């Protein structure tokens, strides 16, 4: 199986000294169990949906392997909601349209999962992430894409938020990525791929 993870720095694992992030951590036990797996982390720091939209399909096509099943995992939103030059990096309507375009195309190519954005240290940025979490969940529901809301659980986790605050205010360390990986690993949407 070939699994491609697309998104921003929170997919990339920025801030994790082990260089695994949550995406690497959920693949480690699969490899250890003897599964044949090719894993691509295609998270790019500071990329929002307007940057992911034009690149993801070409990058996926380059990584498909004949005779192997392909899977796609998307996780984005925090870069869209960042404030750059005094304004939101990507307006909410554009994020919705970009997400719909990405996911509607992706579902025609391979099974797809979506992992929602987490909270961050800044309260106003977290409020924007809460809003986009709801919007992305709705887009996924419309398209039949399983959606994992990590925001709600992590917003209630003092440990996660302390980890983010101790780091750079946006990215957790290995501890926080470990919490996300536990949520994804225990998610039926993920588990059903390996039954």
Image: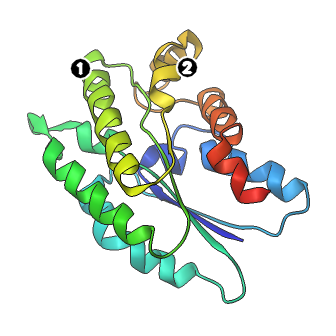
> Can you tell which mark lies on residue 160?
2
Left or right: residue 58 compared with residue 80: right
Badge 2, how many Cα within 10 Å: few under 14, some, many 20+? many
Please, what secondary structure does the residue beneath circle 1 have? Answer: helix
In the picture, residue 195 is in which quadrant?
bottom right
Residue at the spot of label 1: 124
Q: How is colour applied across the structure in the image?
A: rainbow
Q: At 51% across and 51% down in the image, what residue appears?
A: 12
Q: Position of residue 86 (x, y in %)?
A: 8, 33
Label 1, label 2: how many angstroms apart (C-alpha)? Answer: 17 Å
Please, what secondary structure does the residue beneath circle 2 have? Answer: helix
Q: Position of residue 193 (x, y in %)?
A: 70, 58
Outermost residue, top side: 158
Left or right: residue 117 compared with residue 26: left
Q: At 38% across and 62% down in the image, what residue appears?
A: 103
Viewer-nearest residue: 42 or 2: 2
Q: At 27% across and 26% down in the image, what residue appears?
A: 125
Q: Position of residue 138 (x, y in %)?
A: 33, 42
Looking at the image, residue 123 lies above or below residue 192 = above
Q: Are marks 1 and 2 in contact (CB under 8 Å)?
A: no
Q: Position of residue 113 (x, y in %)?
A: 53, 54
Q: At 27% across and 29% down in the image, what residue appears?
A: 131
Looking at the image, residue 98 lies above or below residue 117 = below
Badge 1, how many Cα within 10 Å: few under 14, some, many 20+? few
Viewer-nearest residue: 118 or 164: 118
The total of numbered circles placed on residues is: 2
């Amino acid at each position: 199986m070939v699994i491609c993870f697309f998104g921003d720095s929170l997919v990339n694992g920025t801030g994790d000294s082990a260089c695994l992030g949550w995406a690497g951590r959920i693949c480690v036990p699969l490899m250890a169990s003897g599964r044949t797996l090719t894993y691509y982390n295609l998270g790019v720091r500071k990329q929002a949906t307007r940057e992911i939209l034009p690149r993801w399909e070409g990058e996926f096509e380059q990584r498909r392997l004949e005779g192997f099943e392909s899977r796609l995992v998307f996780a984005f939103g925090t870069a869209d909601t960042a404030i750059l030059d005094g304004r939101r990096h990507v307006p909410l309507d554009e994020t919705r349209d970009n997400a719909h375009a990405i996911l509607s195309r992706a579902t025609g190519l391979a099974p797809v999962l979506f992992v929602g954005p987490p909270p961050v240290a800044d309260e106003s940025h977290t409020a924007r992430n809460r809003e986009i979490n709801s919007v992305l969940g709705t887009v996924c529901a419309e398209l039949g894409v399983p959606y994992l809301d990590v925001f709600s659980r992590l917003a209630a986790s003092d440990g996660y938020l302390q980890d983010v605050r101790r780091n750079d205010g946006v990215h957790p360390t290995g501890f926080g990525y470990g919490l996300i990986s536990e949520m994804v690993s225990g998610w039926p949407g993920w588990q059903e791929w390996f039954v």
